[in-house]
Image (cartoon, rainbow, N blue to C red):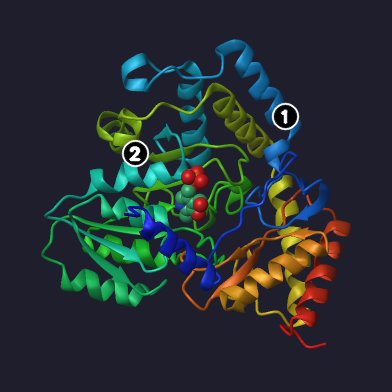
Amino acid sequence: MNKLGFIDEALADLREKGLYNTIRTIESSIGAWVTIDGRRVLNMCSNNYLGFANDPRLCEAAKRAIDDYGVGPGAVRSIAGTMTLHVELERRLSHFKGTEAALSVQSGLNTNLATIPLLTDKDDILFTDELNHASIIDGVRLTKAQRAIYPHRDVDALARLLEENRSIPKKLIITDGVFSMDGDLAPLPGIVEVAEEFGALVMVDDAHGEGVLGRNGRGIVDHFGLHGRVDIECGTMSKAFGVMGGYIAGSAKVIEYLRQRARPFLFSSAATPPDVAACIAAIDILEASDEPVRRLWDNARVFKQALGDLGFDLGASETPITPVMLGEAKVAWDFSKALFVEGVFATAIAFPTVPRGKARIRAMMSAAHSAEDLKFAVDAFAKVGRRLGVIAR
Ligand SMILES: Cc1ncc(COP(=O)(O)O)c(C=O)c1O
């Protein structure tokens, strides 16, 4: 009896539908260029927005932390104590975000698993955007609260759902800040307004707003000037910060509650000393200058303009995220492979990361890309786009 036959079937099904994900192995640090299969290729798909992943200042901070603190935290913080480094990161994060307090956890995914089940229980209701990130969906799965899924970015529909459920005392609205696969923004001012009208809590996952939006990359709440009106901000240090780790920022009361009860905090060890030190170094850089953020946006303008002029469908992005919409998964994978031949690394994104039939290349430049790098990428997209009939010859 083949007890694992269902896996053979599932994998064969993925291959047949063009959804099988082939993960490339990178032989270098993550920069504008990376080495894959011994070849130097232009990296157009990482979330290393500011180029911090191999920034010497972050690397140096990580090395110093290893000398001072070693490589591991030893155990979960609530049992084995917390390092001064973690306390320092939380202090710096809350200052950067303009909140009373912050809590560091191991990853962005964990921030949602930590927070959502603690804020809502079976008598409560949560309202979630239909395109929210998988980690929000997983956090939602951990609560017994009722769920109301509202159409993407539709504040009127959200208000109607809030009205229909007016009698439920505890309501929580959760949204991505920047929707990672489309690059569009949550209509946060409208969400906050209806939340205030109906007495709902608001939580935003700012994973892709961090280091990108707001003054010196302080994120979406800062971008919209909504300080004090969003109850919980979650984020990750794995994207613009170039490192690893998640944080939750909010009032001292919310953070204290999470510190006492959040399961990823209580039952999983803390981020490592070099990670934490590198995150602090990233905050140092951002607090000192908005130059990396400006460079990212300048590069985004040049790149998006050039691809748009070529006739590519770039979706509805409002940020440097550049979805090159291709439709079927197979087209996206063919496009990705052809780009690689041209020296450009940009992975195809298909279901379940995006809805079926909306496969794409999520092209991502960074502050570390030069003007020549962007031209190299645009030329490759043009060549492949014409060859595959995606744009006119
Ligand atoms: C919106 C959003 N939240 C959370 C995460 C998870 O972050 P991390 O990679 O730090 O777990 C991601 C990254 O994929 C994301 O896009």
- 6 vs 265, nearest the viewer: 6
Q: Name the residue under label 2.
A: 251
| Vertical placement of residue 320 versus 139, above or below | below
Three-letter code for the amino acid on which mark 2 is drawn:
Ser
Q: Mark 1 points at which residue?
A: 57
**Does residue 265 show up?**
yes
Furthest-top residue in view? 68
Indicate the position of residue 307 as horizontal and vertical percent values: 75, 74
Q: Quadrant of the C terminus?
A: bottom right
Indicate the position of residue 179 as horizontal and vertical percent values: 50, 62
Which quadrant of the structure image shows residue 44? bottom right
Task: Count all numbered tags in the image, as a single digit.
Answer: 2
The residue positioned 46% from the left and 19% from the top of the image is 73
Indicate the position of residue 57 as horizontal and vertical percent values: 72, 29
**Does residue 188 show up?**
no
The residue positioned 75% from the left and 52% from the top of the image is 295
- 203 vs 270, nearest the viewer: 270
| Vertical placement of residue 286 versus 81, above or below | below
